[in-house]
Amino acid sequence: MDFLATFFICFIPLFVAVDPIGVIPNFIALTNGLEKSKLRRVLMQSMITAFAVSVVFMFVGQQLLGYLGITVADFMIAGGALLFVFSLKDLVSTGHEERAALDDGVGAVPIGVPLIAGPGLLTTTLVMVNQYGYFVVATALVANIVIAGLCLAFSQAISRFLGKTGTKTVGKIANLLLAAIAVMFIRKGFVEIWQTMN
């Protein structure tokens, strides 16, 4: 399989896990009232934090699994179950939760982590690394975080274009896809365990 094909195989689940459109309402609520200079700082802070945490987890997570004696199949099943729970939670949420506007320190937490680099992205990244290697996953990760940053940079315009209903609909579709990807991870994990037992 060539690099481009592998890249897109990694890119799509990571894109769904990041859900850049779905992050927009929270981003707008958290940065409401900030000056443009502070808003740019928050945006850069969030992208750097999301990338740093994801990359560190991508490398350290592998070592941690080895020390704990956890196999790739074990993590695929557990990670898939976790992804499914998070996607299901967002699918059935009413969207009435209120978030207070904070100062410009929100870039690292909660925007960078966990809104961009949440459990879904971290789990998906680690599972993909086990299947496709570090380089292609890191490349797909950078591409997704850049896209997320662009979406947040133009969040006001995107939100006006899609409207509240459109933004929520895109988020729900992304969570539905994430649930399907979670089921795929669980299925592949059980298949791998079955093959090692026979």
Image: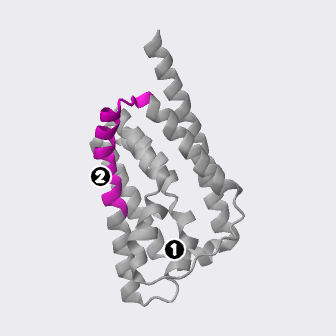
Position of residue 46 in the picture relative to residue 176 (left or right): left
| Amino acid at pointer 2 | Val
**Where residue 32 sits: x, y (%)?**
52, 85
* Nearer to me, 69 or 131: 69
Q: Which mark is residue 56?
A: 2
> Can you see residue 35?
yes
Which residues lie in the magenta part?
50-73
Mark 2 and mark 1: span between their CA atoms? 24 Å
Residue placed at 36% from the left, 56% from the top?
Answer: 143
Among numbered discs 2 and 1, the one appearing first in the sequence: 1
Is residue 67 on the magenta stretch? Answer: yes
How many other residues sit within 10 Å of disc 1, few (<14), some (14-19) or many (≥20)? Answer: many
Q: Which residue is mark 1?
A: 27
Where residue 31 appears, as percent x and y from the top left, is: 49, 81
Main SS of the magenta part reads helix
Q: In the drawing, does residue 151 fall left or right of residue 174?
A: left
The spot of residue 93 in percent (x, y) is 69, 60
Residue depicted at 36% across the width and 88% down the height: 37
Task: Say above or below: 131 vs 163.
Answer: above
Using the rendered image of the protein, determine whether residue 15 is visible from the camera's viewpoint: no
Q: Is residue 49 magenta?
A: no
Name the element at disc 1: helix
Q: Nearer the viewer, residue 86 or 20?
A: 86
